[in-house]
Amino acid sequence: MRCSIAGALEHIGDRWALLLIRDLSLGLNRFEDLRTSTGIPAATLSSRLKHLVSSGIAERVPYNDHPPRLEYRLTPKGHDLWKVSVALREWGDRWDASGFGAPTVEMVDRETGRPLTLGLIDNETGQAVPIGRATLRPGPGADDQVRRLLEPTEGASE
């Protein structure tokens, strides 16, 4: 399937992988800490970490020579997934996906303490763009199917 979302999901894997990305971004780097935080079975954790490493999202880094011990850290590719986890958290908070009735964490500006949300930013101006002005257009890798899908239809309002 020629779709960036489908391709990204193949790299990430499943819900366990997203929870591991969350914890790695919070600074949990060791196998046992990740297992305790997520409650994931050890065999599943090992499999998901291997997948994240083979996808270039995480890397194994030695932290002790005697005995040899490794920890996991996000690569730059993995750090870029942080925005995905923020978007999922915001969606989960809005629709009470946790079932707790209120967010368990909030993202705030470190200086002002005011709440923050993800936004769409104009690359040239750095200004936020309202979602109602956002649209999709075919990109450089688009095939004919994508071009047809994104072509304006006759009579469509602008």
Image (tube, rainbow, N blue to C red):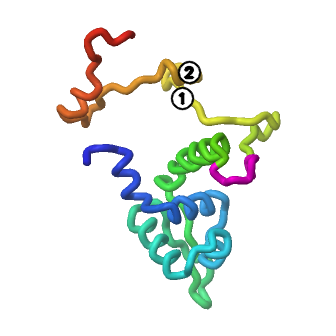
* Residue 105 visible from this viewpoint: no
Q: Are marks 2 and 1 in contact (CB under 8 Å)?
A: yes
Q: Answer few, some or many: residues within 10 Å of disc 1's Cα (few below 14, many 20 plus, some between 14 and 19).
A: few
User: In the image shown, does 126 or 84 lie closer to the viewer?
Assistant: 84
Q: Quadrant of the C terminus?
A: top left
* Residue 92 visible from this viewpoint: yes
Q: Answer few, some or many: residues within 10 Å of disc 2's Cα (few below 14, many 20 plus, some between 14 and 19).
A: few
Say left or right for 95 vs 113.
left
Identify the residue position indicated by label 2 in the image. 130
The disc label shown at residue 120, or none: 1
Say left or right for 106 vs 119.
right
Q: Quick one: which residue is furthest to the right in this view?
A: 112
Q: Position of residue 102 (x, y in %)?
A: 76, 47
Q: Quick one: which residue is furthest to the bottom in this view?
A: 67
Task: Indicate yes or no whether the magenta region holds residue 58.
Answer: no
The count of marks equals: 2
Q: What residue is shown at x 65% (from left), y 35% (from top)?
A: 117
